Structure formats: structure tokens, C-alpha cells
Amino acid sequence: MAEIIAIVIFIGSFLGMVTMVWRKIPILLTLPEVETLPKESLFSNLKRKIKKYYPLKNFSLESFLQKVIYKIRILVLKADVKTWHWLQRLREKAQKKKVKEDHYWEEIKKAIKEE
């Protein structure tokens, strides 16, 4: 039942589109032909559109590079601080381990002397 309804809707829609196109064909035939302008290259067309866009009129590559390099520098400094903290923790752990090892050997020496 649902398939029959879908087919009827499909055929009705198709006939409606054909009717609209059939009615518009005479009007389209009476329209004058439009002369086409010579095609611009994609690069020149894009360049022209960019120049029209207001914020990019005063675009400075130098200031843009300064901002990018400044942000990169900040990220590098943050990474440097983070690695410094990791290094400090590793040194502290190594120092604690060394202190434990020193006590270990002292205890063994004491045990040997007591025997």
C-alpha cells in the first residue's frame, strides 16, 4: 500500500515538473541571447574579489608574521617551562632513589660488622 502511494506521488511530481517546463519553454525561446564577457583567469578574478573585501585592503604581511611568530614563541616557552618541571621531578626522584640506595649499603655494612 505504501509503495503504491509513493509511486503515485512520484508520478504526480514528475508530471508537475514536466508541466512547468512545458509552459516555460516558449518564454525561454523569446529571451534575447546574452553576450558572454571574456573569461578572466581564476587568479585575476580571485585577486579582484580580495581587493573588494574591506578588511584585506589594509592587510600587512609583516604584522601578520609578527603575530604568528609571537604566538609560536609563547607556545615554545610554555613547552620549555613544562619540560623544566618534568626534569625537576625526575631529578628529585633520582635524588630520593640515591639516598635510599646509600642507606641500603650502610645497612649492609652495619650488618656485616655486627656479625
Image: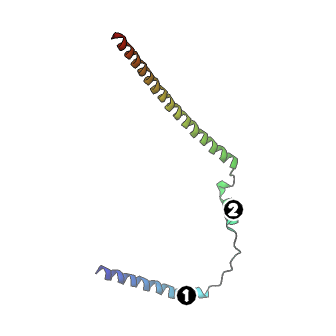
* x and y, in percent, of residue 110 in the image: 37, 12
Q: Is residue 72 left or right of residue 37?
A: left
Q: Relative to residue 87, is residue 12 depicted above or below?
A: below
Mark nearer the N terminus (1 vs 2): 1
Tell me the amino acid under the disc marked 1.
Ile
Q: Is residue 80 left or right of residue 58?
A: left
- Give the labeled residue for mark 1: 25
Tell me the amino acid under the disc marked 2.
Lys
What is the number of the mark on residue 47?
A: 2
Task: Examine the image and state in which quarter residue 49 appears.
Answer: bottom right
Nearest to the eye among marks 1 and 2: give it. Answer: 2
Task: Examine the image and state in which quarter residue 77 appears.
Answer: top right
Give me the residue at 35% from left, 80% from top.
6
Q: Nearer the viewer, residue 109 or 58?
A: 109
Task: Examine the image and state in which quarter residue 55 appears.
Answer: bottom right
Give me the residue at 54% from left, 33% from top.
81
Residue placed farthest to the top in the image?
114
